[in-house]
Amino acid sequence: MSRGNLEDVFPLSPLQEGILFQALCHPGSGVYVTQLGWRLRGELDGAALRRAWQAVADRHRALRTGFVWESRARPLQVVVGRVAIGWQDEDWRGLEAAEQERAWEQLLAADRERGFDLARPPLARLSLLRLAERDHRLLFSFHHAVLDGWSTATVLREVFGLFAAECGGPRPALAPPPSYRDYVSWLRRQDLSGAEPFFRQRLSDLEAPTPLGIDRPGVRSGPPRRHVKWQWPLGAPLAASLALLARRHRLTQSTLMHGAWALLLGRSSGRDDVVFGTLLSGRPAALAGSEDMVGLFINTLPLRVALPARQALPAWLSGLNLELARLREHGHCPLVDVQRWSAVPRTLPLFESVLIFDNVGLVGLPAGVELPPGLHVDNDFGADQNNLPLTLTVRPDLIDFEYDPDRFHAEAVARLGEELGILLGLLVGMPEACLGEIADRLQEIAAERRSGRVASRARRAFEKLQRPRPGAAAHS
């Protein structure tokens, strides 16, 4: 980076430091590389779209940020004054549809493995692929150390608003964005004296993370490889019933989902006391302009949940709702400090699963995006990998399980998803029951379904044995 092009230098947030450490430890793994893809159908001015992306990069420091760490006690983030957004155009019109799909998959894999040189901004790039005269694919890749989901939505709204203006629409009124540096400065001013007793009370006797109970034998140790995604559709009727249940008990749907995962983790691990990670937005109301800042604000902290068998579901959920509110009060606390206040050795993680309640939406274009007339954009692809074995992302219409295939068999994750669906149905159908009653009913239903599948497989195998083999003599 040229000193003449230097705009600012300041420290990292604690989560940025953690992500930078993981990325440097696992080069080429794709960890914390986010990829978003869209299908663009209709008349597209690629040059105008590129100008819009560059204009947004010029506006926001996060898209002009890199990191320096060598020969330093603590890393720093460096903002350059001007940098060209990474961009490549490719023409795939000469390829058949099947060849285009193969080329797309190869591009995604190569782009992920390539990752980013974290010392060289921008830590974002785009690929525009022309499939036909009025059919394109757009891939946006960036490093999670500079953007979170909320910030990505802000970037996309601005990009497509400016793109529509480039194509003849009204130009959006964009105020100068507040600086991410202000957030980092706010973090460094926070007093953690209240956070320490809060976490010590909950974690001082925690010596190991809660096991997921579905590990395959001979677990591999080493850098993470690409996680596999398994999706379970929530379904409109169940989603509506869960929303009604939440309103009835004056809870958020996020609390309901955290409760369901705690109950399922208790069943899977055989524990009546579980710990898992929860993602917090991290945007402090006390910091003016934080809603409009672009950068990395999220934080992941441990949530410990007791599962008393005799406690009624409404009272338990109310207690969980209160605990989540208390945890959010300490949402700025660095995870490394939280681990220090627990009894878990630093060689082990505090948790092996994390729940993300996604009320922003990572894959689709955010609400309110302006598009040029005649252009239609369809969600095409979204992938984001952390270094945890299992990530559960709850969206309005489905639940994503992203998992390490070296740790878990696909069948075990699918079974976990199926049981989560059963459990959510039980929360709706047994809203006044005790936790023990819900757990017993879940076990009964899961056992019945397993027995049915085993019986069905045995019946198919028996029927196969009864079929006459080709060339075999008929017996009278």
Image: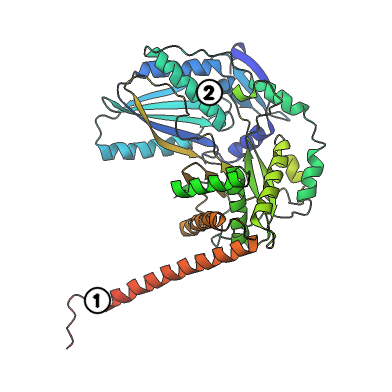
Q: Which residue is drawn at 18% across and 87% down?
A: 475
Between the residue at mark 1 and the residue at mark 2, the CA separation in whole angstroms equals 64 Å
Instruction: Pinpoint residue 409: horizontal percent, then vertical percent.
Output: 49, 58
The reply to whether residue 387 is visible in this rendering is no
- C-beta proximity under 8 Å, tags 1 and 2: no
Amino acid type of the residue that numbered disc 1 sits on in the rendered structure: Arg
User: Image height check: is 309 above or below 175?
Assistant: below
Residue at image position (48%, 15%) is 55
Looking at the picture, how far across and down is residue 297, in whole percent?
63, 31
On residue 412, the disc is none
Residue type at mark 2 is Pro
Q: Picture coordinates of residue 338 (x, y %)?
A: 74, 43
Circle 1: element type: loop
Q: How crowded is mark 2: few (under 14 residues within 10 Å), some or many (20 or more)?
A: many
Residue 7 seen in this snapshot? yes
In the current view of this chain or complex, which residue is farthest to the bottom?
Answer: 476
* Residue 467 tag number: 1
- The residue pinned by badge 2 equals 122
